[in-house]
Image (cartoon, rainbow, N blue to C red):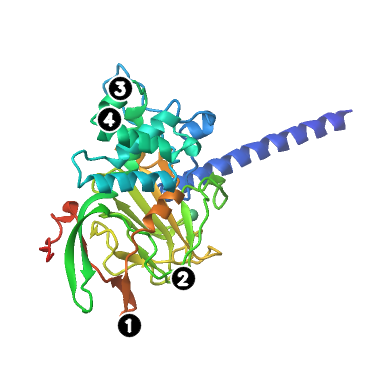
Amino acid sequence: MYCVVKLKQLVCMVVVLCLLAGAGLYLCRRMDAHMADTQAAEQTEAQAGPSDDSTASPAAEPQTAAPSASPEKKDFIKWVDFDVPYEAMNAALQYDIQSQQEAVKLNWVDLLAYLGAKYGGTFTKYKESDLAALVEKLKGGTTIAELTRDMKYFGYYQKAYGAVLNGFVGPYRIQKPIENSTETQWVDTYGLKVFSPIAKGYYYNDFDDFGTARDYGFKRKHLGHDLMAQVGTPVVAVESGIIEAVGWNQYGGWRIGIRSFDGQRYYYYAHLRKNMPYNASVVEGATVKAGDVIGYVGRTGYSATENVNNITQPHLHFGMQLIFDESQKEGNNEIWIDCYQITKLLLKNKSTVVKNEATKEYSRVFDFMEPALEPFFNSPTPTE
Ligand SMILES: [Zn+2]
């Protein structure tokens, strides 16, 4: 009897110790992970937002900070599910571009925000005829403010989709080849001014892998979009901005983080090539033009040691984080969006690149300028 009691006590103690050790290990892992670099897109779980606690109708009740009596509590968007399909983005984009020549200018973000509010963010309900009907009303002279007066969440979608898309469309200048000549000329234009992250002439394949499981370090969700491509494929800056992070991250390997000029988008390019991950121009604080070559596809990452190839299949991890308030930049309140549909849209602009055989570097062939770049670069005079 005494022995049995003793044995029971022993078993209990062992179980308790195991539980404590397990919890301690888990906490250590989480601490390590966050201390290593909280900017790693592949690292954080999607902890905030309706995807965890109200999946049924995430967009019907969009999360913004509750208005509070405390002056320190700021009212900003806490979560965004970006589910707008390529077809809707492209149709809205075409309306926006075409309308620039017309009396009533259409804003594609407003068009998409109207649909977002109408569908409660669920674009499986999307019909092109809904967009056409909206455009018809706007062209007829009704304003978007009048049309959305009774839409409780239009303002939310306008801000949320705007945070994703505001840097995508506008006036810009680009070099184009002159026909039957080796010369180029600058052309002033308006339209999509963001580029595919993979250079022109290079193949990649992808699928919608946002939110799939990852377990290096600790169990978490995949908060980006993977583009499978050969090692050495030139990686291109999607949007212009300032390089905010360069270097090794145990999850992302050699990675680059670029912040848009409006501060709302943080682009994350990871698993770059071993030994020669970056274009020589890439340094922290540097300004990057949309379409510039910033690095090369590789398979680095999943190691605390620098310059280690622990990713099995070479790919570019492309992520986009939304920042409405700087408190969301790092930690448990990060907002990463699904870039699969956006990546399809970006295929409209591929940057043509050329290799320098001496340095093994690639660089863009056709230069680019947009108004936000003017403080950093001399603006060329258009020749057309
Ligand atoms: Zn990835």
The disc labelled 2 sits on which kind of residue? Val
**Residue 189 picture location, percent across and down:** 20, 56
Please say if 151 is above or below 45. above
Amino acid at dot 3: Arg
Q: Position of residue 243 (x, y in %)?
A: 28, 56
Nearer the N terminus, badge 4 or badge 1? Answer: 4
Between the residue at mark 2 and the residue at mark 4, the CA separation in whole angstroms equals: 47 Å
Q: Which is more toward the observer, 300 or 63? A: 63
List the residue tagged with mark 1.
357
Q: Name the residue rendered at 37%, 55% in the picture.
A: 346
Q: Is residue 169 visible?
A: yes
Q: Nearer the viewer, mark 2 or mark 4?
A: 4
Identify the amino acid type marked 4: Ile
Left or right: 2 in relation to 43: right
Residues at marks 1 and 2, CA–CA distance in whole angstroms: 17 Å
Q: Which residue is mark 3?
A: 149
Disc 1 to disc 2: CB gap under 8 Å: no
Quarter of the image with the C terminus is: bottom left
- Mark 2 sits on what residue? 231
Give neighbour class at mark 4: few <14, some 14-19, many 20+ (Cα, 10 Å). Answer: some
Is 223 above or below relative to 79? below
Q: Which three-letter amino acid code belongs to the residue tagged 1?
A: Glu
Q: Is residue 31 left or right of residue 295?
A: right
Question: In the image, which disc is placed on residue 144?
Answer: 4
Contact (CB < 8 A) between labels 4 and 1? no
